[in-house]
Amino acid sequence: MKIEILGPGCSKCKFLEEQVQLACKEAGVEAEISKVIEIDEIVAKGVFSTPGLIIDGKLKSFGRVPAMPEIKNFLKGM
């Protein structure tokens, strides 16, 4: 699984990354987690409000940090 955290490094972006790492650990999911910090690249992926979360190429959320249960559902493919 490939997960991208989109954002310039604000506190919400960092918190989202921490939550995603924790969700992966708790769900037993192995994932490659990367950060996208270049604004041009973030906008090109359709995110105009950070943080953004992309899982396996699909935009799952942007402009907020999803709750832990929602992140886990994203990991399960829901």
Image: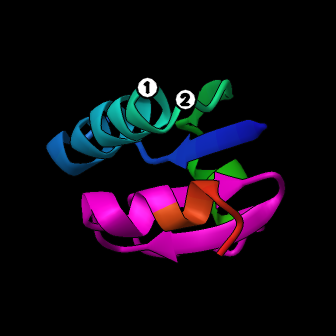
Residue at the (44%, 47%) spot, across then down = 7
For numbered disc 2, what is the local secondary structure? loop
Callout 1 amino acid: Lys
Callout 2 amino acid: Gly
19 left or right of 35 in image: left
Residue identified by numbered label 1: 25
Q: Which of 26 and 64 lies nearest the eye of the viewer?
A: 26
Does the segment drawn in magenta span residue 62?
yes
- Eyeballing the image, is 28 above or below 1? above
17 left or right of 32 in image: left
Quarter that holds the C terminus: bottom right
**At which x and y percent is residue 20?**
41, 40
- Eyeballing the image, is 70 above or below 23? below
Q: Which of 44 and 16 lies nearest the eye of the viewer?
A: 16
For numbered disc 1, what is the local secondary structure? helix
Q: Are there few (<14), some (14-19), or many (20+) residues within 10 Å of tag 2?
A: few
78 left or right of 51 in image: right
Q: Which residues, given as a range, are shown in magenta? A: 44-72
Residue at the (81%, 52%) spot, across then down = 56
Q: Are there few (<14), some (14-19), or many (20+) residues within 10 Å of tag 1?
A: few
Residue identified by numbered label 2: 28
Q: Residue furthest left?
A: 11
Q: Quadrant of residue 74?
A: bottom right
- Eyeballing the image, is 57 above or below 48? above
Circle 2/circle 1 CB separation < 8 Å: yes
Residue at the (49%, 34%) spot, across then down = 24
Q: Which of 7 and 5 lies nearest the eye of the viewer?
A: 5
Residue at the (61%, 27%) spot, across then down = 33
Quarter that holds the N terminus: top right
Mark count: 2
**At which x and y percent is residue 40?**
67, 54
